[in-house]
Image (cartoon, coloured by chain):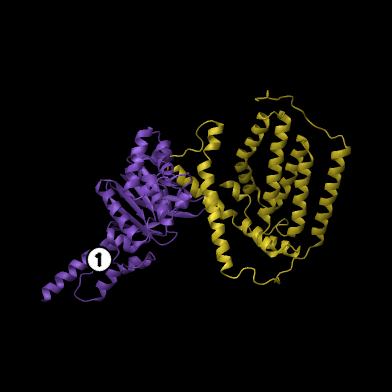
Chain colours: A purple, B yellow
Amino acid sequence: MITVEGLRYVYPNANEVLRGIDLTIEDGDFVAIMGENGAGKTTLVKTFNGLLKPTDGRVLIDDVETKKASVAALSRSVGLVFQNPDHQLFCETVRDEVAYSLRNFGYPPDVIERRVRGILETLDLMPYMDSSPFMLSGGERKRVALASVLVSNPRHMVLDEPTIGQDYQQKDRLRNFIVQLNTQRKTVVVVTHDVEFVAECKPRVVLLSGGKITADGRAEEILTDGALVERASLLRPQISLLFSSVSGLPRDVIDVFTAKAVISNTVRGRK
Amino acid sequence: MRVFEGFKFTKLQTPIHSMDPRAKFVMIMVVFAISLLFTNVLILTVILLVQVPLIWLGRSIRRWGGSMKGGVFLAGLIFFMNLLTGSTFTYSLAMTIRFLALMSSFSIFFMTTSPDDLGLALEQAHVPYSLCFTFTTAVRLVPTMAVDAQTVIDAQRSRGLELDKGNFLKRIRNYIPILIPLIVSAIRRSIELAEALESRAFGLTSRRQSLIVLRMKMSDYLTILVSILLLVLAVWASIYAQLPSIEIPFQLPRLW
């Protein structure tokens, strides 16, 4: 469980980014943290694995206070995938890159090999196993970065803008993969601006604005509230815009699959 | 990444900030040259300490302190590498102080000189514009590199990297996962920047006119004159004068 109590964070240049955050993320929750640029989303998730220590308040990961634990110890239970893969890739091959964290955690070679192959297969990266990560496309590098964190099997996964630079098919695969992780009782926290991605995943949505939580609830409730969404510099999902402009259709539909079912029922009812 | 803070320009109204960049450059180059002339610990310490009032005048003591603190690791590396490769204790110490003096002088220059003024100074010295642009862009990218470096460190620590773990050599090796992504992203950024510039017709105009023309004041001429006189004096002293020195008779046995 991730517990955030009265969290304030002030950067050394006196910029107060988080101004009193209270948040509880239960094991197995799927949460999307959304908000305008500079709202404090990335700062908030960096406190989850102790990269940033709270100025005031506290963050607890499975009852361990992040102020009292090292980043290396916390990163065993909190996997954080950064936005830009180029900020972490450095090995000669994809295989070495993915094995890096396992080597840091001291796993034996046979376990490392098995886990690396497993995650590369899951993320469709086996053909690139012996390639240099620097020779891959942006989307592939992003998946290598994701694999390099997922391979250590952390209980809580935090993904910072995972959909940036991914084509629609990869985004769809990523969505399925995240849902699959979540069904394995892993906590998944996604920081994103991608409203359509969130609409299709339908997680719990936490809206941040000016370093404070302005809304916390089901995606269907938050993403259909025009005023809330606008305050967070986001746009409502296209399906929500369409459904709210046609009379007689429900207002809380945000994804294509539900929309298809609702429209089919409505059309069938009229016949 | 405090070390980079000491090379970042901040706009302030101080006598050092308002100096002409050319005069400041001559002054810094003289410090550079004098530092290279001597291997005397006392002289090098004086060169380092003489810079403190200038930094104080430029109201940059705190950032300078941060950058010097950040440079301690490299200074330590220089000291131990010299000692391990057979240099005397005094010589190793001199090389370390020389490094700090050089770092400090460049820190003063970059903290108090705007990249725009630097570019103008180079242009007015008839340096080709493409070179001026390259130089000023490199200076301007220092803060961006600092942010990148911190992000890379965060990303690798999130994968279990512990920078302070292990013996001296292991700690040096720990920096490989930081340096490679940093270099790769810098190269990627430079290629993207070059392409963006070319697609906006960079270099099409051969003759450029500047809106602002730098003019040296009397105090700038005086700075250049004093700097050159100091350099001449230092050259003379290094050849003819018997300067006081200290010698610590310690040397490690040769390892190979």
The answer to whether any part of residue A215 appears in the image is: no
Callout 1 amino acid:
Val
Disc 1 element: helix
Any part of residue B133 in sight: yes
Horizontally, is B230 left or right of B154 in the view?
right
Residue B89 in the image: above or below residue A197? above
Residue of label 1: A256
Q: Quadrant of residue B242?
A: top right
Residue occupying image coordinates x 27% and y 47%: A28
- Which chain letter goes with mark 1? A
The picture places residue A161, in percent across and down from the top left corner, at 39, 56
Quadrant of the snapshot with the N terminus of chain A: top left
Side (left or right) of B55 relative to A218: right
Query: Furthest residue to the right?
Result: B240
Asked whether A75 or A88 is in front, the reply is A88
What residue appears at the point 22 percent right and 67 percent down from the top-left corner?
A259
In this view, which residue lies farthest toward the top?
A: B253
> Residue at (73%, 47%) from the top-left corner?
B53
Q: Residue at x 87, y 42 (%)?
A: B236
Residues A96 and A153: in front is A96
Residue A181: image location, x then y, percent: 28, 48
Image quadrant where one finds the C terminus of chain A: bottom left
User: As rendered, which of B227 and B133 lies closer to the eye?
Assistant: B133
- Number of numbered callouts drawn: 1
Question: How far across and how far down the image is residue B115, in percent?
Answer: 66, 60
- Sort mark 1 into few (<14), some (14-19) or many (20+) by Cα contacts within 10 Å: some
Place of residue B238 in the rendered image (x, y in percent of width and height, measured from the top left)? 84, 39
